[in-house]
Every structure is written in C-alpha cells, then in structure tokens.
Image: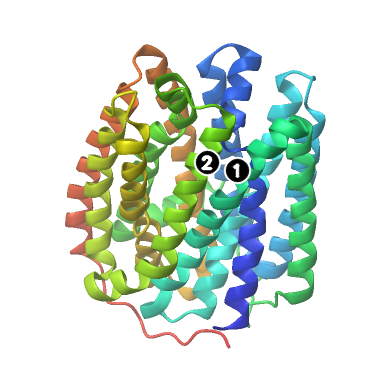
Amino acid sequence: MDRRYIVLFLTIFIDLLGFGLVIPILPNYIKDLAGSEVWVGIGIALFSAMQFVASPLLGSLSDRIGRRPVLLITLLANALGYVLLGLSHGQGLWLLFLARAINGFASGNISVAQAYIIDITPPEKRSGAMGLIGAAFGMGFIFGPSLGGLIMGTLGFPWLGWIAAGLCILNLLLAQVMLKESIAQKNPASPIRLIPIKDYVSVMRQPVIRSIFLINFLYITAFFLFQVCTTLFWEDHFGLDDDHRGYAFTFLGVCTTVVQVLLIKPLSAALGDRKLLVIGNIGMAVVLVAMGLVPSGLFLALEVPLIFLMALMNGPVGPSSISLLSTQTDPREQGKVVGLYQSFGSLARVVGPLVGTTLYGVYYLLPFFLASVLLLVNAGWAMRMVKGLRPAPSVAPVQ
C-alpha cells in the first residue's frame, strides 16, 4: 500500500481516538451538569455548527495553500480544544462549550483529508480508499470509548481532555514528519470565505451535485436523530453505565472497521457506488427503528446484533456518496466542493441532535421512527438521482 495512505490513516486515527475518548461520556456528563437533554443537543450541535463553518473554509484554503499545512494547523487547534475541555471541569458549561466549539472547527479538517485521498486516487478506486477514513473512525471507536471509560473511572473527567490533547500533539508530529503535500498545482484563486454563500449557490445550481448534497444532508440528519440519543437510550432503557456504554461503542467500532477494511472495496466492485447508496439508506431505515424496539432485557441478544447490522448498512453510504461526488467535480475544486459537502453534512449534525434530543424528551421512540421515515424517503430520492450521474472521468492521480 502507498505510504501516503498509511500515514493519512494514522493521522485520522489518532485524531479520532481523541474524539472517541469523550463520545460515551459527554452526553450524560452534560445532562448531569445542566439537568436537561436539551443542553445535550445544544452541546453536540455546537460542535457540528463549527464544522459547518470550518469545512468549506478549510477545503478552499487547502486548494489555495495545500492540504498539508491546513492539516497541521487544525491538528494544533484540536489539541488546544482538548486542553480547554480538561480545564472546563468544575467551571460550568461555558468553558466546555468553548472547547467543543474549537474542536468542532478543527474537525472540519476531515474534508481536507478526503480531498487529499481524492488527489492521489483514481476514480474507480476512491470508494475503497475512502473506506480508510471510515476505518479510522472505526478504530477510534474501538479504542477511544473503552479507554475513555477507564480514564473517567480512574483519573476523572479532566484527564479525558488532557490525554486527547496529547494524542493530537503526537498526531501533529507524525504528520509534520511523514505527510507530504498531495497537490502538484495549487489554486491561488480559490476564494476564502467565512460563510461561502456564493459557493453554495454555485454548486446548488448543478442538479446532480445538489442532489448528492441534499441526500447526504437528509441521511446524516436521520442518523443523528438516533445517534445523539444513543447513550441516553442505552442508560435509560438498558441500564448501561459509562463502562458498558464504552464497551458497546467499542463493539460498534470493531464492526465498523471490519466493514470498512474488508467489505467496502469488494461491495463497491460487485454492486457499484450507486446501488450501495440506495441499499444503505433502506437498510439503515430498518435497523434504526428495530434498535429502538428492543425490549429492555435483551441488549445482548438483540441490540448487539443490530449494532453489527447498523455498521454493515451504514459503512458503504459515506464512501459511496463522496466517491460519486468526486466524479462530478472539477479536480481543481475538489477541496472546495468536498469542504462544502462536509459543511452541509455538519449542518445536518446541528439539526439532528437538536430535533433528536427534543423528541427523546417527549417520547424515547420518536427519534427512531422519524429517522426511519427520513431514510426511506432518502432511498427513493437516491434511486432517481443516480440515473442522472455522468460517467467518471479518467484522471491520473498525483504521484
């Protein structure tokens, strides 16, 4: 395997490991601190709102000055955010939310990492290559949540932030030494806008790209209606504590990694990105509502197998969507368009948590049911959209 893929995988993995440390802890920590599920939604939505701002800005900046410097700057910012997270213990919500805002902005670098992979990968292999990012997420969930539960139980909440900051510094050093620039010719005319309204208008005028953006938006909204309520649901319905929720997320990470590493490439070759996008939406619609209907005493017997099915159905959707988008985009604007795509997805991560936690407070099954309906609608939309895609161009990757 090309060394650049390995280095980028390690870079994303260490970044996501720091993120995974706080995943099973933060929602319940905010709820206990604030006394309301609504503040959980606000805390999660704030992170995503900053991603919404950062993703297109960082993507366009990476077209202009290169992918490598943008990745290095955001890794340093991520470390700062986690330091503040550690210092926020006992200071109320304001410092914790500031830390999440910084980490959310820095996490907009995922669009830059995806653009990097597009730069060095031919179109027909991009789904498999994008599986690297999914695998990095999965590995972060394997080690992060269980390690987070251990740190929380033995050292306390502040150490979650400080250890995550240390991992980000290690990540920064690794990228500084080993990650080379991926674009041979930068685009100095790439516009840098804090709120890129003109860029959104430009891409939304292109019917196929608009459809891919909106399908991704609806998918992520549906997924986060469920995801943000997961730790609350598992504690309230099944009685899982911090450690056991960490084990559940670890299992999800194992399943996600297996799917991304072993199955995405053969599934893409056998079925194609277009079919995988449709199948993934339908499968997730069934799995998510089924997870909400599992009786309280059957977590191991039914909920755990459904977690595996969720990883199987969810796994191909992201790589297929970004691969299809890349074939419809001018190579000179990959960073900008992928940044806008990720930004639009981040907006869904604002909507999903706010709606999901509000519905959960009314009745715990409402997020599951609404997510299923949205995904079924999305599957029908995706079926129509893929018929209008043009063939992938033959573009040589940067060597």
Q: Which mark is residue 278?
A: none
* Residue 169 picture location, percent across and down: 80, 56
Q: Quadrant of residue 23?
A: top right
262 lies above or below 154: below
Q: Which mark is residue 146?
A: 1
- Which amino acid is tagged 1? Ser
Q: Which is nearer the N-term, disc 2 or disc 1?
A: 1
Q: Quadrant of residue 183?
A: bottom right
276 lies above or below 355: below
Q: Note whether residue 20 is visible.
A: no
213 lies above or below 153: below
Q: Note whether residue 229 is visible.
A: yes
* Residue 155 picture location, percent across and down: 78, 34
SS assignment at label 1: helix
The C terminus: image quadrant: bottom right
Q: Which residue is mark 2?
A: 247
Tell me whether the residue at label 2 lies in contact with that at label 1, contact meaning CB atoms closer than 8 angstroms: yes
Residue count near mark 2 (Cα–Cα under 10 Å), binned few <14, some 14–19, many ≥20: many
Residue at coordinates 48% horizontally, 59% vertically from top-left?
A: 134
Q: Is residue 183 left or right of residue 348?
A: right
Q: Nearer the viewer, residue 231 or 237?
A: 237
- Which amino acid is tagged 2? Tyr
284 lies above or below 244: below
Residue at coordinates 46% horizontally, 67% vertically from top-left?
A: 130
* Residue 34 picture location, percent across and down: 63, 14
The N terminus: image quadrant: bottom right
SS assignment at label 2: helix
Residue count near mark 1 (Cα–Cα under 10 Å), binned few <14, some 14–19, many ≥20: many
